Image: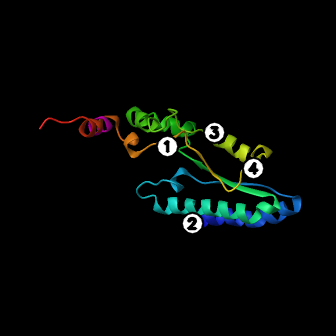
Amino acid sequence: FDVTVGGPWLGAKHCIPPMIEAGGGAIVFTSTVNSLITNPHFGAYSSSKAALNGLTRSLAMEYGRSGIRCNAIAPGLIVGARQEAAMAADPLEDQMNRDCYPIGRYGRPEDIANVALFLASDEAAFVTGTVLVADGGLTLQSPEALVRPSFRQRWREDVLVPQPK
């Protein structure tokens, strides 16, 4: 909690006064989709990132009239070359994970960098207090869409197709 919320809070505390003197600016925090949805054993992480989302909205509300916008990015899984190589070691699991993303791939560092550049730019001058989800569509889906295809197919057959008795 100290790192996930305390760090951004301290950063904002020290950058806001000079931003006010300069006439405003933009603050962009990095949250996560796990602040909006969660997984087992992610309680501390998810709740601390949800608190960061609250801080984002509070700062946007408190300092908007001073010309300061505050937003957060909620990425899904972001994978660099090293992680990509490790995931390739288990092709079946890798494909099952990729299937969770409607666009068919994991996020890349540059995907999130581009979102941050947008939120920090004048192009986003009317965007504040937002937690922008950049997850390749991961959070669009119901739990049914995220289970193994073989299980999903069996579930659909059992529920949607009348079974002989």
Which mark sits nearer the N-terminus, 2 or 3?
A: 2
Q: Nearer the viewer, mark 2 or mark 4?
A: 4
Q: Is residue 92 above or below residue 3?
A: above
- Find the magenta span and give its range: 151-155
Q: Is residue 11 visible?
A: no
Q: Nearer the viewer, mark 3 or mark 4?
A: 4
Q: Hey, what amino acid is under mark 1?
A: Leu
Residue name at image x 76 percent, y 63 percent: 63
- Counting from the top left corner in percent of width and height, residue 33 is at 53, 50
Tell me the CA gap for discs 2 and 1: 27 Å
Where the N terminus falls, by quadrant?
Answer: bottom right
Tell me the CA gap for discs 3 and 4: 21 Å
| Mark 3 nearby-residue class (10 Å; few <14, some 14–19, many ≥20) | some
**Residue that label 3 marks:** 111
Residue name at image x 77 percent, y 66 percent: 14
Residue 140, numbered circle: 1
Residue 1, numbered circle: 2
- Counting from the top left corner in percent of width and height, residue 75 is at 58, 47
Give whichever of 89, 120 is nearer the camera.
Answer: 120
Residue 79, numbered circle: none
